[in-house]
C-alpha cells in the first residue's frame, strides 16, 4: 500500500527517509506544531514550492531540458485564478475555472514552444524560453487594464478559506478558514507530488531518462524523442500552473514580482540543484531548506552586516539585499562539487 | 576509329531563379524591412529618424552578439553569463567617463573622443580579463556538458551582477554624453541624433573589420574551419583550445564595448541591463543561425529596425515584436537564417 503510494520509488537511504518523514510530519501538523501567522506562511510556501520544484525536476532532472519559462507557467496558473475570481466573483467555481484554464493554457503554450524549439535542438529551448518568459513578464506588467500591472490583483476567495471564518479551537489553536486553506494547499500539493512520482516511475519516465542519457540511442530504439520531450514539457507546465493556482488561492493576491520574476526562476533552479537533480525527493529537501533559509537566514545576514560595520567592503557583501550573491556562489559550487545534490550524497553514503 | 569514351557534354545548370532568391533571401530581408517601414510610416522624416535609430540599436546588439555566436560555434559552449560582461563593461566605461569629466564637459571634439576612447579601452580590458577568468573558472570544468554549462554560467551571471551592486551600489547611474556628441543634425527634415549616427558608423566599421579578420587572415581561417569541423582542425595540428580562449576573450571584450555604447545610448546604466540585453542577443543569435557572424549581423539589424518601426506604428505591439520575428523566422528556417554549426 505505502510502496504503491510512492510508486515503489523508495528513498534508499536511512537519513533521507528520516528527513522526508520529518518534513511530512511537520508540514502535516504545521498549524499545531508552530502556531503563528509567519510560520504558517512559511509552511504553505514550502508545500507549493515542493510541487513547483518537483515539476521543474521532471524537465531538468529527468528529461535533461533546461527551461527558463517555469515561472511563466506558474504565473499563468496564478493569474488564471486571480482573473477568474475578479471577473466571476467570489466562489469555488471561479477557483476551479481559473485553475483549469491556467493549466490548459500553460500546457498549450508549452506545446507551442516545444514544437518550435525541441524539434531542432534542445539548446534552443533554453534560449527561447528565456526570451518568451521575459516577454510575457513585460507584457503582464504593461497590460495594466487586464492584469493590474505592477500592482497586481487583489480579489476575494470563498469565505470558508479566509481568516474571517471561525470554527472554534482545537488544542489551543483556533480553527479558522486560513487553516482550512492551508490544508487545501497541503493535500493538493501532496497529491500533485505523488502524481509526479507516479509519472517519473512509469514507463514514460523511464523513456525520459533514456533520452536524457542518450537521445540518439533512444531515437534509434524507436522512441519518438520529440514527442516524449514535448509531452514532458507540457506535463511539467500544467503542474507548475496548478502550483501557481494554489499560490494564488493561498495569498489572495498576484503580482509580477511574486509569480513571474526571474528571481523566482533562479530560486527554483537552486532548489533543484541543491536538493538533487533527477529525483523527486530532491525537490522536497531543496525546497524546504531553501524556503527556510530565505525566511530566516536573511535576518541573520542583516545582523552580521551590522556587526561588521566599519570594515571595508564586508558589510556590503553581507547586506541582506546581497542574498543572491551568496546563492549564486553556492549554486556554482554545488553544480561542480555536488552535481547529485543532497539526496545523491545521502544515497551514496549508505 | 571511334572514340572510346562516349560523347558527353556536361551542362552546368545554373540554380533556378527562385532557388537563387531563396539563398539570398536573408540578405534581402533588411532592405525589404526598410522599404516596408517607409511604406507604412508615410512620412520621410520620421522614417529616416526611425531607420537610423533602428540601425544604431541593431549595430550595438550585433557587437554584443558576435562574440557569443562565435564562442558557441567554436566550442559548442553556450554562455548565459555573456550579459554580465555587458553590464561590467558599461559600469567600467561609464565610471571612466565620469572620472574624465574635465575632458567630456568641454565642447572640444578631440578631448571628447579621447575620453570615449579611454573609456572604451578601459571597459574592453576589464571585460576581456574578466572573460579570461570566467573561461578558466566557470566554463572550463564543465566543457562538453550543456546542461551544467547553462547552470553554472547562469550562476556566474548572478554573482557578477551582484558584485556590481556591491562595488557600485544598488542604484542606477545617470550620465550625460560628451558635449560634441549631444544634440542632433537635421538631414532632409529629419532630426538625427549625432550619437546614433556615430554608433551606426562605428558598428559598420567593426563588422567590416571582423569580416576581414575572419575571411582574410590565417587566424580567421582557423576560426571558421574550427566552427565547421573542430576535430579536423585539431588533427591538422592547430591548438583549438588556445584559439577558443582568444575568441572567448575577444567576445567578452566586445560585449564590454557594446555595454559602453548602450550605456551612452540610453544615458542610464543598471546592473540588470546585461540581463535585459541578453534576451535580444539570444533572439539575434537564434534567428541568425548559431555560429554565424553574418547571420547575427542581419538578425541584429532586423531586431533593431523592427522594434523601432513597431514602436512608432503600434506601441503596444513593440513588446512582442521580437518574439513574433523569431517565431516567423524559425517557421521559415528552423535552424536560423544562416546556420554554420551542424546540429551537434
Image (cartoon, coloured by chain):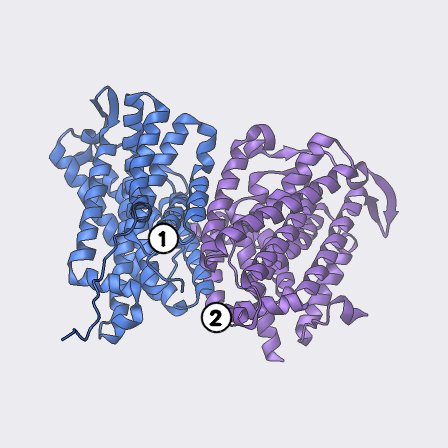
Chain colours: A purple, B blue
Image location (x, y in percent) of residue B128: 26, 56
Label 1 Cα crowd, 10 Å radius (few <14 / some 14-19 / many 20+): many
Q: Nearer the viewer, residue A313 or B266?
A: B266
Q: Is residue B266 above or below residue A265?
A: above
Residue drawn at x 41%, y 68% is B142
Q: Secondary structure at mark 1?
A: loop
Residue drawn at x 50%, y 38% is A138
Residue of label 1: B289
Image location (x, y in percent) of residue A56: 59, 57
User: Is any part of residue B120 visible from this angle?
Assistant: yes
Residue drawn at x 59%, y 38% is A255
Image location (x, y in percent) of residue A19: 68, 68
User: Is any part of residue B174 visible from this angle?
Assistant: no
Residue drawn at x 33%, y 52% is B338
**Quadrant into which the N terminus of chain A falls:** bottom right
Q: Secondary structure at mark 2?
A: helix
Amino acid at each position: 500500500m505505502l510502496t504503491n503510494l510512492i510508486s515503489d520509488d523508495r528513498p534508499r537511504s536511512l537519513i533521507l527517509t528520516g528527513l522526508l518523514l520529518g518534513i511530512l510530519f511537520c508540514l502535516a501538523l504545521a498549524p499545531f506544531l508552530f502556531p503563528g501567522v509567519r510560520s504558517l506562511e512559511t509552511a504553505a510556501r514550502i508545500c507549493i514550492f515542493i510541487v513547483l520544484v518537483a515539476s521543474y525536476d521532471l524537465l531538468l532532472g529527468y528529461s535533461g531540458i533546461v527551461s527558463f519559462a517555469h515561472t511563466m507557467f506558474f504565473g499563468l496558473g496564478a493569474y488564471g485564478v486571480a482573473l477568474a475570481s475578479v471577473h466571476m466573483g467570489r466562489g469555488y467555481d471561479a477557483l476551479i475555472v481559473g485553475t483549469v484554464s491556467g493549466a490548459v493554457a500553460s500546457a498549450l503554450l508549452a506545446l507551442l514552444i516545444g514544437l518550435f524549439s525541441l524539434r531542432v535542438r534542445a539548446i534552443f529551448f533554453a534560449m527561447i524560453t528565456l526570451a518568451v518568459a521575459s516577454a510575457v513578464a513585460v507584457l503582464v506588467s504593461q497590460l495594466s487594464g487586464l492584469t493590474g500591472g505592477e500592482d497586481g490583483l487583489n480579489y476575494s476567495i470563498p469565505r470558508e478559506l479566509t481568516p474571517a471564518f471561525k470554527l472554534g479551537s482545537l488544542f489551543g489553536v483556533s480553527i479558522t478558514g486560513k487553516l482550512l486553506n492551508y490544508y487545501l494547499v497541503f493535500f493538493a500539493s501532496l497529491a500533485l507530488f505523488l502524481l509526479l512520482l507516479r509519472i517519473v516511475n512509469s514507463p514514460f519516465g523511464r523513456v525520459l531518462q533514456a533520452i536524457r542519457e542518450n537521445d540518439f540511442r533512444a531515437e534509434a530504439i524507436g522512441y519518438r524523442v520529440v514527442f516524449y520531450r514535448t509531452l514532458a514539457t507540457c506535463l511539467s507546465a500544467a503542474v507548475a500552473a496548478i502550483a501557481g493556482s494554489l499560490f494564488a488561492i493561498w495569498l489572495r493576491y498576484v503580482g509580477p514580482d511574486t509569480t513571474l520574476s526571474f528571481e523566482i526562476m533562479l530560486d527554483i533552479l537552486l532548489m533543484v540543484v541543491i536538493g538533487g537533480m533527477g529525483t523527486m525527493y530532491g525537490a522536497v529537501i531543496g525546497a524546504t531548506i531553501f524556503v527556510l533559509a530565505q525566511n530566516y537566514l536573511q535576518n541573520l545576514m542583516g545582523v552580521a552586516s551590522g556587526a561588521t560595520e566599519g570594515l571595508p567592503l564586508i558589510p556590503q557583501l553581507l547586506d541582506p539585499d546581497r542574498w543572491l550573491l551568496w546563492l549564486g556562489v553556492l549554486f556554482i559550487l554545488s553544480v561542480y562539487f555536488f552535481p547529485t545534490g543532497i539526496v545523491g550524497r545521502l544515497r551514496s553514503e549508505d | 576509329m571511334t572514340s572510346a569514351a562516349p560523347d558527353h557534354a556536361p551542362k552546368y545548370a545554373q540554380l533556378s531563379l527562385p532557388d537563387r532568391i531563396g539563398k539570398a533571401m536573408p540578405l534581402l530581408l533588411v532592405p525589404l524591412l526598410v522599404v516596408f517601414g517607409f511604406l507604412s510610416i508615410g512620412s520621410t522624416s520620421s522614417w529616416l529618424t526611425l531607420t537610423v535609430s533602428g540601425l544604431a540599436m541593431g549595430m550595438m546588439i550585433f557587437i554584443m552578439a558576435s562574440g557569443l555566436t562565435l564562442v558557441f560555434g567554436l566550442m559548442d559552449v553556450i554562455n548565459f553569463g555573456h550579459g554580465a560582461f555587458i553590464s561590467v563593461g558599461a559600469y567600467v566605461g561609464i565610471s571612466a567617463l565620469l572620472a574624465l569629466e574635465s575632458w567630456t564637459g568641454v565642447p572640444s571634439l578631440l578631448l571628447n573622443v579621447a575620453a570615449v576612447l579611454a573609456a572604451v579601452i578601459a571597459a574592453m580590458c576589464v571585460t576581456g580579463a574578466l572573460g579570461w577568468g570566467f573561461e578558466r573558472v566557470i566554463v572550463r570544468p564543465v566543457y562538453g556538458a550543456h546542461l551544467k554549462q547553462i547552470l553554472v554560467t547562469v550562476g556566474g551571471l548572478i554573482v557578477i551582477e551582484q558584485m556590481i551592486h556591491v562595488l557600485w551600489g544598488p542604484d542606477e547611474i545617470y550620465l550625460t554624453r560628451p558635449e560634441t556628441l549631444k544634440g542632433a543634425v537635421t538631414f532632409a527634415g529629419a532630426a538625427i541624433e549625432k550619437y546614433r549616427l556615430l554608433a551606426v558608423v562605428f558598428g559598420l566599421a567593426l563588422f567590416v573589420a571582423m569580416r576581414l579578420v575572419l575571411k582574410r587572415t590565417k587566424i580567421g581561417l582557423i576560426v571558421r574551419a574550427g566552427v565547421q569541423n573542430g576535430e579536423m582542425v585539431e588533427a591538422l595540428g592547430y591548438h583549438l583550445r588556445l584559439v577558443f580562449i582568444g575568441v572567448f576573450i575577444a567576445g567578452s571584450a566586445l560585449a564590454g564595448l557594446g555595454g559602453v555604447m548602450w550605456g551612452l545610448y540610453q544615458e542610464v546604466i543598471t546592473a540588470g541591463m546585461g540581463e535585459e540585453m541578453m534576451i535580444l542577443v539570444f533572439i539575434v543569435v537564434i534567428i541568425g543561425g548559431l555560429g554565424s557572424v553574418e547571420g547575427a549581423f542581419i538578425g541584429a539589424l532586423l531586431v533593431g529596425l523592427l522594434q523601432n518601426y513597431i514602436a512608432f506604428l503600434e506601441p503596444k505591439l513593440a513588446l512582442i515584436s521580437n518574439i513574433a520575428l523569431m517565431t516567423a523566422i524559425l517557421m521559415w528556417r528552423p535552424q536560423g537564417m544562416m546556420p554554420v554549426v551542424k546540429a551537434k
